[in-house]
Amino acid sequence: MSKTVSPSSSTVPAAHTAWLKRNAFWRFAHIVLTPFFVFWVRTHSIGTDRIDNTKGGLLLLNHESYLDPLVAAFPLRRPVSFLARDGLFRVPVLGWILRHTYVVPVNQTAFRGSTIRAAINHMNRGFLVGIFPEGERTRGKMVRFNRGFLSLVRRTDLPVYPVGIVGTGKLMPVGSAWIRPGKVTVVYGHPLTDEEREQLRTGTNDHELAEMMRQRVADCMAEAGH
């Protein structure tokens, strides 16, 4: 695993609070699942050194499988707050697990202000927040990004990272209840540049802006494929 970058931000205290206070269940799950990720789902990561571990941030990921949140978070060894449908929190046992692994509930029909505020609050506390702009699992080829995620990207000055995942769609494709053995590669891209942030702030064509972000994730997938 790549080394993390050195602290260089005034947000260090908040970030370290999140880092040091990983709850017992999160730590236990990480330890128990490590052999699974090492020997069954052979997870290879590239670019972990591009993640600034002194502060929170936003991860934009492609989505092929239910495995994606797990394989994206595992190499970072720090909590990642993914967004999940609020209805899942009412499912016995699963709801308890979601609440104890820093998952943020989101209304399925709209990317509401309460969801945005909750995600930003998690990032300000030092967590990474992960979202899947495609909105649902795909079958090997990325689809157009839903534009709702742009409202969150525009409301934070914290780093925004594109993340590409390759391999999960073969190990656990849509409709499968079984995880096949294989290899998964996760690429953490460089954060958005100042120029890209300015485009997001001043641009008026959300379709083009969403496509710009989709291309950044596609670049990470291409790097993973190589």
Image (spheres, rainbow, N blue to C red):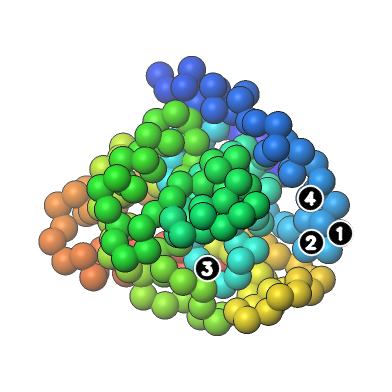
Marks 1 and 3, how far apart at CA:
22 Å
Marks 1 and 4, how far apart at CA:
10 Å
Residue kind at label 2, given as amino acid type: Arg
Residue kind at label 3, given as amino acid type: His
Q: From the image, which quarter does the C terminus lie in?
A: bottom right
* Residue 111 percent location from the top left of the image: 30, 57
Q: Earlier in the sequence, mark 1 or mark 3?
A: 1
Q: Is residue 215 above or below residue 115?
A: below
* Residue 195 horizontal side relative to residue 86, left or right: left
**Are discs 1 and 2 less than 8 Å apart at CB?**
yes
Q: Earlier in the sequence, mark 4 or mark 3?
A: 4
**Are discs 2 and 4 less than 8 Å apart at CB?**
no
Q: Which label sits in the foreground, 2 or 4?
A: 4
Q: Which mark is residue 39?
A: 1
- Residue at (62, 24) in percent of width and height: 20
Residue kind at label 4, given as amino acid type: Leu
Residue beneath label 4, please? 33
* Residue 91 percent location from the top left of the image: 57, 58
Q: Secondary structure at mark 1?
A: helix
* Residue 62 percent location from the top left of the image: 50, 66
Residue beneath label 3, please? 63
Toward the viewer: 6 or 100? 100
Marks 2 and 4, how far apart at CA:
12 Å
Toward the viewer: 125 or 210? 125
Mark 1, Cα crowd under 10 Å, few <14 / some 14-19 / many 20+, is: few
Q: Earlier in the sequence, mark 2 or mark 4?
A: 4
Q: From the image, which quarter does the N terminus lie in?
A: top right
Residue beneath label 2, please? 42
Q: Earlier in the sequence, mark 2 or mark 3?
A: 2
Marks 1 and 2, how far apart at CA:
6 Å
* Residue 216 horizontal side relative to residue 180, left or right: left
